[in-house]
Amino acid sequence: MIKGFGGIFWRTGNLEAVKKWYSEALKLEIDSWNGTVIRPGSGNETILSFFTEDDPYFPAEQQVMLNFQVHDLDEVIKHLEQIGVPLAKNKESSEFGQFVWITDPDGRLVELWEK
């Protein structure tokens, strides 16, 4: 039934700052309609995963966490350092890949993943 992941939509109290941050930090080209289309390439996956309300993986006050798959996590980390975006969680490796967290202007944790 499901063809693919349709999108992520959320509200922000500071639209221009959030758009600028995602454009600079993650190099997403935010269009005039305040969004972008990400066209996944081969090998890119979208994960839908549910967590209990008390799961410690990400803060309980944050109902949703964004996860972006990246080509080269070390290059992304260098870019983030160059523009002054600190890591909220240092790089971790597991059987699922390598991960870091950063925080957007609304205080939302964003996970970056290299498979």
Image (tube, rainbow, N blue to C red):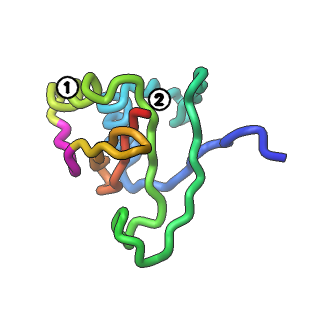
Q: Gap between marks 2 and 1, in whole Å?
A: 22 Å
Residue to which mark 1 is pinned:
78
Residue drawn where x is 37% and y is 36% of the image: 22
- Closer to the N terminus: mark 2 or mark 1? 2
Looking at this rendering, what residue extends furthest in the front direction?
Answer: 95
Q: In which quarter of the image is the C terminus?
A: top left
Front position in the image: 19 or 91: 91
Picture quarter containing residue 77? top left
Q: How crowded is mark 2: few (under 14 residues within 10 Å), some or many (20 or more)?
A: some
Three-letter code, disc 2: Ile
Camera-nearest label, 2 or 1:
1
Front position in the image: 1 or 27: 1
Looking at this rendering, what residue extends furthest in the bottom direction?
Answer: 54
Q: Is residue 110 left or right of residue 91?
A: right
Estimate the x, y position of residue 87 in percent, counting from the top left. Answer: 20, 44
Instruction: Identify the element where label 2 is drawn.
Output: loop
Q: Is the magenta stretch mostly helix, strand or loop?
A: loop
Residue drawn where x is 36% and y is 63% of the image: 58
Three-letter code, disc 1: Lys
Instruction: Identify the element where label 1 is drawn.
Output: helix
In the image, residue 14 sits, relative to residue 35, either above or below, namely: below
Q: In this view, does 36 lie to the left or right of 22?
A: right
The span picked out in magenta is 85-90
Residue drawn where x is 51% and y is 53% of the image: 10
Residue drawn where x is 19% and y is 25% of the image: 78
Estimate the x, y position of residue 64 in percent, counting from the top left. Answer: 48, 60
- Is residue 87 inside the magenta stretch? yes
- Is residue 107 inside the magenta stretch? no
Residue to which mark 2 is pinned:
30
In the image, residue 18 sits, relative to residue 32, either above or below, namely: below
